[in-house]
Amino acid sequence: MEEGRVYLGNLDVAAKRARDILLGKIKLEKVVDWANAFSLWPVHLTTSCCSTEFAATFGPRFDGEQFGALPWVGPRQTNLIVIEGTVTRKMACAVRVTWEQMPHPKFAIAMGACALDGGLFYNSYNVVRPWEVIPIDIYIPGCPPRPESVARAIVELQRRIRSRRVASSWIREGWRPDRDYVAPKEDYCSWQRTSSPVPL
Amino acid sequence: MVEARERAEGVVGPRRYEEVLKAARSRAEEALRAVGVSFSIEEGKGFVDLVVDVDSVVRAAEALKAAGFDHVVSVTAVDYPKRKQIKVAYHVTSYLDPEIAGGIVGLAVYLPRASPEMPSLTSVWVSAEFMEREVYEFFGVHFRGHPDLRPLLLVPELAEKHPLRKDFVVREESIYEGVPERVRRG
Amino acid sequence: MSGEVRVYGGWRDDLGLRVIPSKRIGKDVYEVFIGPQHPGSGHMRIIIRVDGDVIVEADPDIGYVHRTMEKLGEIRGWIKPIPLFERMAIHDACNITLPYVRAVEKLMGVEAPLRAKYLRVLLCEINRIASHLYGFAIFSIFLGHSTMYMWAMGDREVFIQLAEELTGARLTHSYPIPGGVRRDIPQGFPDMARRAVRYMRKRLEEYRKMFLENPVIRSRLEGVGVIPKNLAAELGLVGPNARGSGIAYDVRIIEPYEVYDELDFEVPVYTEGDALARTYVRVEEIAQSLRIIEQVVDWLEKKPREPIVDESIYKKYPPLHKKILESQGRAKLLPWMATMKVPAGAAIGRGETGRGEIIYYVESDGGVNPYRVRIVTPSARNVIAFKYALPGHRVMDLPAIYGSLDYFPPEADR
């Protein structure tokens, strides 16, 4: 068997782990991290044109589902958000609302040059940096990044979750100890309230 | 069980665009002359602009609509700060009239830059509705009688600044950014 | 905001953000906000007003991907907007940028040589197929038909690979430049293209069996979202949406740019105007694009290689650039192009992208930057269809109508 097989959630490996847990050889925390790492479900929130490459990642050629990541519809059932490209002023509100709705432990990947520092639109008046809106774990450079690099980012995130025990400590503490507190400096949803014809 | 669908007659072609444009142009000029609207002509490459007065723009639009120009391709606004004017051009063409289909004719007006205001042409061309909203937020042109005039793409705070006007400056990084002056000289 | 509150854990919400609830706006009429995070995963919001589950009014709220293309196009010279405008629809890159390049060419008075024109058409058609297949994939997700998503996404990779062989990039090719293109076809490309065409022909037959004539799909699409011919003309719909409503209009025929007047192809038109008719048009267009690719590849193989940039630009090439162009078929961009000046005037460049007609109004004042670039993309013109096609349908028909219009928000918002 190839070396990469362990990432695929091999049944033998799973059975062995289950036995180890029952015998008390592995701490439950480790299992939580392991389980979280292989069920990273990205939410369907497409912020910009990198979504074409994101869709290709989960298409048959690159098959992103082999890493245990499956794009899913509702934010309430997902734990990963992939910022696909530029975030505009209007979209920042949607990103933040979706992020708030997702249950923890949750993670974020910023995809594309625009999500790093604006990319081609670095001096645009309508573009915000996603790291001002939500805390980002992994950045993927490229414009647009190839599907391989999206898969690479997911694997890297899995590795990080398992090596730093992110998920289990988050559940135990109620907040994430290894990251800074990120809250938007401004209320990105203010336009929504003012433009609504009926006061909310 | 399920029957396949029949295909309709395809597009007849290929055609020579110069001839279509010429036909569309003479049709538009005749239509405006018939209703007694005076106009001047601005030539462009691939289109022609007929510049009319703000007061007669609705009559001109109705005449063009009756002449077969059934939809708006683009509501194009250009800001001229030196002349203190904003040009708003409705580029229209036809789908249903095969003789002029595709020929782009512009119905243009010049508005004062300080208080640009003109009657909305959405009652004539439905397809102008969203484009007029766009011109409203990017240039601050107020369309009288528009059914739903509010910003389309921008958030309200940005729309107040009218970003496509020339006095809204976006800084572009030079390729010599951060390079010392003596290096720049070579 | 006090220091103790931690938003990060996801328990507390100290910003006061909340999901906007449905509002009662009249007797038995409620307002529902759909998007921008919704099952179809589009980057837009549709505000619908429903009576029971019947839509009585729809108001598309767009601008979530407005990246200020028109403003940035005014400050970046004449060459740099090409990669910029490409980002409007990166899976349709050549079709999107070609009209801009043609408008600049009209102003400059240069013309691409014949071989470059054929190369442009080749990449345009490859992009058109890839764009339609991407549209199918997203449409199938809307309908919950995930097999078709996998098929279309997988077959799209064939054409992306083809484009990658030709240009070196999967999506953002930046292929046409004023006066020519950047690369000639590599060795062995014609055979590769013919193989792809044969493969896709076979697949189209399978698509028809599995998707178009699938009773489940037909029952969801037939008679849904009907746009009659007169309404489509009045709204100014473009592309397959207009042709599905019986409007025989295609820029490739109306204003034959590049070499479309020398090629043999048809433009399919259907008269029903419903979601299924629009889908049929797209499938037929893929078949026609395959025909064009075959003809273009034959021509390119038969004719000897020649410079792929305009004579006036080729004359200014230094010897090294000429050598690279002749030996490798790569046209380099010259430094003076970054600061070139374009004669004053205004030009309209138009072309038929996968989603319909795109128009660039380019105005120059003789300077190093465009004075004004007005872009009207096909999706920007199709967005008005939501307002008129949705009312009268049930909420569950919304994904079918949305998907059949093949609306792509980054393109619409510019």
Image: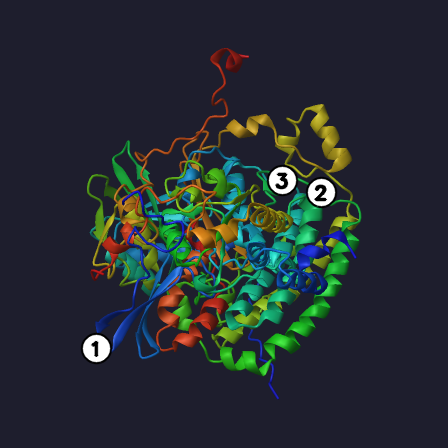
Q: CA distance from mark 1 to mark 3?
A: 61 Å
Subunit bearing disc 2: C
Point out residue B151 in the picture as x, y percentages from the top left corner. 29, 52
| Disc 1 element | loop
In the picture, which quadrant includes the N terminus of chain A? bottom right
Instruction: Identify the amino acid type marked 3.
Output: Gly
| Disc 2 element | loop
Residue at numbered disc 1: C27
Asked if the residues shown at circle 1 and circle 2 are in contact, with their CB atoms under 8 angstroms apart, the answer is no
Residue at numbered disc 2: C184
Q: Earlier in the sequence, mark 1 or mark 3?
A: 1
- Nearest-to-viewer mark from 2 and 3: 2
- Nearest-to-viewer mark from 1 and 2: 1
**A162 or C132, nearer to the observer:** A162
Q: How many marks?
A: 3
In the picture, which quadrant includes the C terminus of chain A? bottom left
Subunit bearing disc 1: C
Q: CA distance from mark 2 to mark 3?
A: 10 Å
Point out residue C45 in the picture as x, y percentages from the top left corner. 38, 61
Task: Tell me where residue B173 sits by quadrant.
Answer: top left
Instruction: Identify the amino acid type marked 1.
Output: Lys
Point out residue A67 in the picture as x, y percentages from the top left corner. 63, 57
- As drawn, the label of residue C180 is 3
Identify the residue at image location x=66%, y=78%. Answer: C209
Q: Is residue B142 visible?
A: yes
Q: Earlier in the sequence, mark 1 or mark 2?
A: 1
Identify the residue at image location x=20%, y=39%. Answer: B114
Subunit bearing disc 3: C
